[in-house]
């Protein structure tokens, strides 16, 4: 996939390097994961974060979509956990462990931990644990 700006895109709508990195980190995404998701090289992500190249509008739109999807996911988790008397969630040590438990979710374990941190701000007394070791 090639990310290009639409013709005549105003400069004041362009995502800054600081916004790009802040959003990536807020979402708990690594540069390598984001590069694979965007189908670009990890170097492209680093160059955008360092301000070496402007961030294409298509990338800005994809980042906004990732934020929206993550926010919707968080809202759903909060709603479910608020209905439980003693809420608790598992977080995962690594991507393999996370994807074994959640094969349909394409995000990395770091994203899941960032989601849980945001959920914990809204769910009083949320217990966060690693899953028990497999036997």
Image (cartoon, helix red, strand yellow):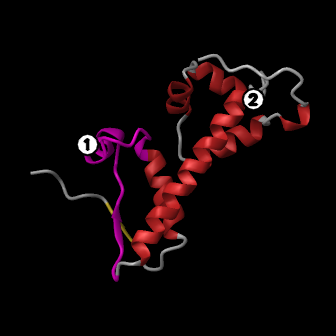
Q: What element carries label 2?
A: helix
Residue 12 colored magenta?
Answer: no
In the image shown, does 30 or 81 lie closer to the viewer? 81
Question: Could you say whether the residue bearing mark 1 is in a helix, strand or loop?
Answer: helix
Which of 135/65 is in front? Answer: 65
Residue 8 x/y as whole percent: 89, 23
- Name the spot of residue 116 as percent of width and height, x first: 46, 60
Q: Residue 57 carries which label?
A: 2
Residue placed at 53% from the left, 37% from the top? 30
Q: Horizontally, is 34 left or right of 105 in the view? A: right
Q: Judge whether 123 appears above or below 85 on screen.
A: above
Quadrant location of residue 133? bottom left
* Horizontal and vertical percent position of residue 75: 52, 63
Nearest to the eye among marks 1 and 2: give it.
Answer: 2
Name the N-terminal-most of marks 1 and 2.
2
Residue 63: image tag: none
Left or right of residue 91, residue 48 in this image: right
Residue placed most toward the observer, 94 or 6 = 6
Query: In the rendered image, is residue 119 in sight?
Result: yes
Q: What stretch is highlighted in magenta?
A: 85-109
Tell me the residue that label 1 is attached to.
100
Q: What residue do we see at 54% from left, 70% from top?
A: 121
As drawn, is 77 to the left or to the right of 6? Answer: left
In the rendered image, the quadrant that contains the N terminus is top right
Q: Are marks 1 and 2 in contact (CB under 8 Å)?
A: no
Name the residue furthest bottom. Answer: 85
At label 2, counting other C-alpha atoms closer than 10 Å, the crowd grade (few under 14, some 14-19, many 20 or more) is: some
**Residue positioned 46% across, 46% down in the render:** 110
Q: How many numbered marks appear?
A: 2
Q: Between marks 1 and 2, how big is the CA–CA gap? A: 34 Å
């Amino acid at each position: 996939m090639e990310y290009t700006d639409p013709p005549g895109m105003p400069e004041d709508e362009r995502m800054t390097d600081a916004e790009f990195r802040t959003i990536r980190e807020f979402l708990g995404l690594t540069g390598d994961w984001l590069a694979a998701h965007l189908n670009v090289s990890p170097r492209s992500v680093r160059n955008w974060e360092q301000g070496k190249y402007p961030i294409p509008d298509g990338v800005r739109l994809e980042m906004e979509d990732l934020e929206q999807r993550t926010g919707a996911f968080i809202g759903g988790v909060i709603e479910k956990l608020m209905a439980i008397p003693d809420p608790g969630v598992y977080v995962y040590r690594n991507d393999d462990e996370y994807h074994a438990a959640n094969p349909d979710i394409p995000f990395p374990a770091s994203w899941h931990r960032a989601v849980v941190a945001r959920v914990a701000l809204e769910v009083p007394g949320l217990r966060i644990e690693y899953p028990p070791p497999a036997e």
